Amino acid sequence: MGILAAFRELDAAVEAIEDLKQQKITDITVYTPTPRHEIEEAVHPPPSPVRRFTLIGGLCGVVFGYWIAIWTSDYWPLVVGGKPVASWVPYTIIGFEVMVLVGALSTVAGMFVNSRVPKITMTVGYDPRFSHGDYGIWVPAAPDRARAVEETFRRHGAVEVRHER
Amino acid sequence: MATLARPGSGAPAPNVASANVQLPAVRDYEQVDNEIAASLTPTAGWFGALGLAILLFLWGAGAWVYQIYWGLGNAGYNPPVMWGVYIITFVFWVGIGHAGTLISAILYLFRAGFRTTIYRCAEAMTVFAVMTAGLFPIIHIGRPWKFFWLIPYPNWRLIWPNFKSPLVWDVFAILTYLTVSSTFLYVGLVPDIAVLRDRETNPVRKRILSVLSLGWRNSEREWRHFARMYLFLAAFSTPLVLSVHSVVSFDFAMALAPGWHATIFPPYFVAGAIFSGIGMVFTIIIPIRKFFKLEKYVTINHLDAAAKLCLMTSLVVGCAYLIEFWVAWYSANKFEQDYFWNRVFGQWWWAAWIMLTCNMIFPLSLFSQKLRRNPAWLFILSIFINLGMWFERFVIIVPSLSHEFEPWQWSGYIPSWVDISILVGSFGWFFMWFLLFIKQLPVVAIAEVKEIVPPKLRKAHPHGDHIDTSGRHQEYEPDTPGEFA
């Protein structure tokens, strides 16, 4: 249950966000057709933890890449030309490629987990115009606070404000 | 400041800096959506092109079936030339794929704004080119159903591939490249698919687009993690793209044949790959720009900047050609010197001169700003570059194998009709996928284009730095393309 507002103009949406934050309303979902620094600065979110997924995935990948090449060589230890059975120089190619593969896929997985996609259903608090050209703000609010939130939206020039549950 | 004279006016017009990659003819986000979505409506010309591509693909597929049935002897292999059109075409298509990742990932990291409107095309080109390239080693091995032996999988025979073999490195490099570039393309498409989903009225198509868009809602939270993911994918793709063609070059450089066993091969191959890929980008983007009416998005400035990149890579490739000769001379190795003489003035002079003319001489025309800003010339030049880069791989592969150390081994090579058919079929296969792509999904990245379009504002700012397309001062400046990371 909450209130959804649509704004035509970027500055109007930004001012509404800042006003809501001054009113200590922090549970805000902002929709924007394209990322904008102005919104990022107004929302002031914490840094994205996706990088940790990247690091862990990359490390797992490089370890697996070296391991599979070394283990299979030692499994069938055939000495050729007096060279080491497990030769780290060519195995670096395998280690690198698997690092990139696992690191990249885990980065995408990190984005999915943190962004909470895929979403199976379109829940409340979204309007198709937010992918088109308008900015949206969704605030979950109990009826006692709804009036204040609605007034804030209208004061900052929302073209539509609606209650959703 | 240099000026470019406007034809027929006599008065010097201001030189339009290539670095200016804003889109002055695009007013707002709605226009971006409407115009790019309009390009998805199929036309008679598109059906005709798709039909031709499918026909070429079926021709090539038929030749492959013939080869499988009658054996690899129907390819034009002539010992010791046991690598021919299939390996040449494999390297050619892998190279084509490189420009896509260069444009989408490397130029993203370098904040090169001109990539914004062409990168989607280039990325799709990468995926379909690598898909095409991946077929050729399978065709080349003659018994394609044994291909999976190259992949390390637990098996009851307890046999594993040889990880010291460049062919196994290739398997890892190509499969990683295909997976990462496909992922990069798809995740970049998700916000744009959401735009199409929200516009769609047909319930079936809407449902399909809903699934493909993963329920994307354009929330600030989604964008924040998306931008971070995109940055890291670009950071992974950058060394990947350099490694893949280096690994392909190891297929040759690890062998002892004259002309192959050279340390210059990895950078030489990477530069050639990027050069050939940019050639293919021009071949694709210039007709799309015209027939999809996207001149407002892929502006002359974008083409100019891409042409400078093309010129630079051509100079690098030309430098590599000359250094190869220098290395042969300086090595005092008779076999190496004899091989290079045979390549350029002997048995293979015609192929070498096609390569040198198309890749070194014609691209010098891009020193002219007038030609860099002429789409018709860029398209014609791109065809020559594609031709020249295919012949570069011919010149690398065939002359070395046909002119090794022992004179009694010296031989020739003539591709058979099966080789040629499969080569032609590969173009049909590539363009079939590409044509299907460009009418189903946006060929220009909608969300990224919106980043460089000034947002709608309530307050006009009298003293702001930025003046929007209507001549009003704007408080908010358009963002640098690709800066969200």
Image (cartoon, coloured by chain):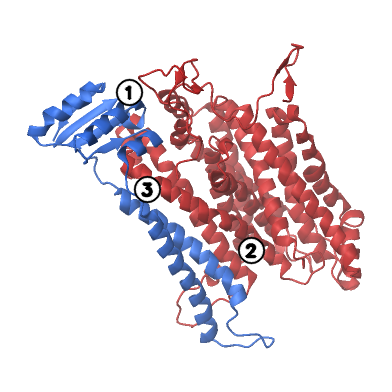
Chain colours: A blue, B red
Residue assigned mark 2: B247
Q: What element carries label 3?
A: helix
Using the image, tell me which numbered label, if any, was put on residue B12. Answer: none
Q: Quadrant of residue A17?
A: top left
Q: How crowded is mark 1: few (under 14 residues within 10 Å), some or many (20 or more)?
A: many
Q: Which sits earlier in the primary sequence, circle 3 or circle 2? A: 3
Residue assigned mark 1: A8
Q: How far apart are marks 1 and 3 (CA)?
A: 25 Å
Label 3 amino acid? His
Q: Residue at x 59, y 40 (%)?
A: B53
Q: How many marks?
A: 3
Q: What element carries label 1?
A: loop
Which chain does the residue under circle 2 lie in? B
A71 left or right of B76 in image = left
Q: In which quarter of the image is residue B125?
A: top right
Which chain does the residue under circle 3 lie in? B
Verify CB contact (< 8 Å) between mark 1 and mark 3: no
